[in-house]
Every structure is written in structure tokens, then in C-alpha cells.
Amino acid sequence: MNSTRKTALVAGIFYLLTEVTAIGALLSYGPILSDPTYIAASGDDTRVLIGAFLEVLLAVAVVGSAVTLYPVIKMYGGGLALGYVAGRLIEAAIILVGTMSLLTIVTLRSDGPTDSQAAVTVGQSLVALHGWTFLFGPKLALGVNTVLLASLMFRSRLVPRPIAVLGLFGGSLVFVSGTAVLFGAYADLSVTGFAAAMPVLAWELSVALWMIIKGFRSVAPATDSAPARTRPTASVSV
């Protein structure tokens, strides 16, 4: 297995891991996101801790996918490739901020606050912070990052162009959807929000499985300038 094939395999695994951990974390967080009085109630926090652990893995996979792909995609657009890596770092940082907001609820809950109403207010504030990080990370930042990578994949033909086009469409749609949520058009966790996220989910699964199963297609890297032509020099006799 050559180095390019290994790069595609590792990047595909990272991309697949982002899907598994993102969905798993959202499902694990169910009670803390849906119960406004969660911080003042008693019970087991194991599901929240599992969700937090999955989001840490998600952040690692987000950064890992970008770092792994960078040596390959930079040959087809250094600026876009660098922007993709930077964008994925920002996306991972936003995800971790949201994770820590929910872990703070777990800590406050275990301390047993005496003022239940104040605790509920604090808990709702921290859940709201997680909601904003979910919008700005796995929606707005993800949309921009998807368009950047899909553009490079379309230009390089490292994966089939229909997959790249799906990424361009899915990334643009999830960004537009996130913007609509930002301005109050509909709720993030709604039927419309989930429907808008389906194309980018399909893109990530498609590009992950292609890289794992097929690897990158053999395409010569693009060059920014044509090779200089040699010109005959005229001799001048004196």
C-alpha cells in the first residue's frame, strides 16, 4: 500500500468517525437537551458523559481529517487547502466549547445547588450555549469547510465529480440553513433543519467510503504556470 493510498484510507476513516460520533453524541445528550430542569433533578449522568466523550472524539476526527488530507489537496490549491485546515480547527474548537458547557451542568448538578430556580436558569443558559455552538460549528463552519474541500476535490478529480458536486451542494445548503436558523426562520433541531443537513451527510458518507474502498484517483497535480519555453538567442556580430 503506497503512501497516497494510506492517506486516503486514514482520511476516510476520520470522516466516517465524524459521522458516527456526531450522531452518537446527539442521541446521548437527549435528556440534558430536552429537560429544562435537568440540572436540579437527580439521576445518572452517564449518558451525558458518553456524549461528551463522543464529541471529544468528533473534534479529534475533524482535525485529523484536515491534517491527513492537507499534503494531498495542497497540490491543487494551497490557499484553499490551508483555509480548509484552519476552518476545521475552528470547527473543532467550537464543538469543544459546547461540550464543556454541558459538562459544567454535570458538575453543578453533582454539587447539589440549594437554589433550584437559579440552578435551572444557569442550566438553561449552558444548554443555550451548546445550541449556539451546534449552529456555528456543525452547521455554519461545516458548510464553509465542506465547500472548500469539495471545490478541491472537483478541481483535482481525486474522487468522482458527482461526489464533489454533492459536497458543493450539501455544504452550501447547510450553510444557508444555518443562516436561516440564526435569523429565526425555524428551529435548528426541526424537520426542516434535519432535511437541510441530509445532503452534507450524504457527501461525508460518500467521500469517506470512496476514500476507504477505492482511494484517490490518479490525477496529475495542477500547475499554476506553464513551463518556460526556451528561446533561441540571436548572436550579434561586430
Image: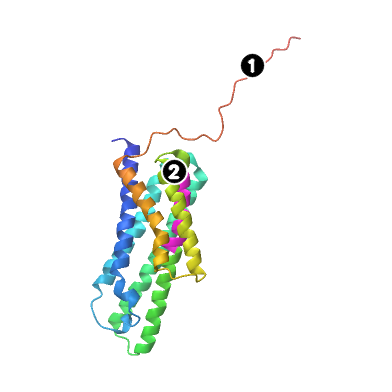
The residue located at (34%, 59%) in the rendering is 58
Please check the rendered image and state whether residue 149 is part of the magenta-colored stretch, yes or no.
yes
Q: Which residue is mark 1?
A: 232
Q: Is residue 177 above or below residue 235?
A: below
Q: Residue 134 sits in which quadrant?
A: bottom left
- Res. 231 image quadrant: top right
Relative to 181, say whether 114 is above or below. Answer: below
The spot of residue 8 in percent (x, y) is 34, 42
Task: Looking at the image, tell me whether mark 2 or mark 1 is earlier in sequence order.
Answer: 2
* Picture coordinates of residue 235, whole percent (x, y): 69, 12
Q: Which residue is nearer to you in this view: 83 or 173? A: 173
Q: Residue furthest bottom?
A: 115
Query: What quarter of the picture does the N terminus occupy?
Result: top left
Q: Is residue 49 at all visible to an observer of this figure?
A: yes
Q: In the rendered structure, find residue 153 and report the number of the disc placed on it.
A: 2
User: For the magenta stretch, what is the residue range?
Assistant: 137-152
At which x and y percent is residue 154?
46, 42
CB atoms of marks 2 and 1 within 8 Å: no
* Identity of the residue drawn at 43% across and 71% down: 187
Name the side, left or right, on which 20 lies relative to 128: left
Q: Kindly identify the amino acid type of the residue bearing the numbered disc 2.
A: Met
Magenta region, main secondary structure: helix
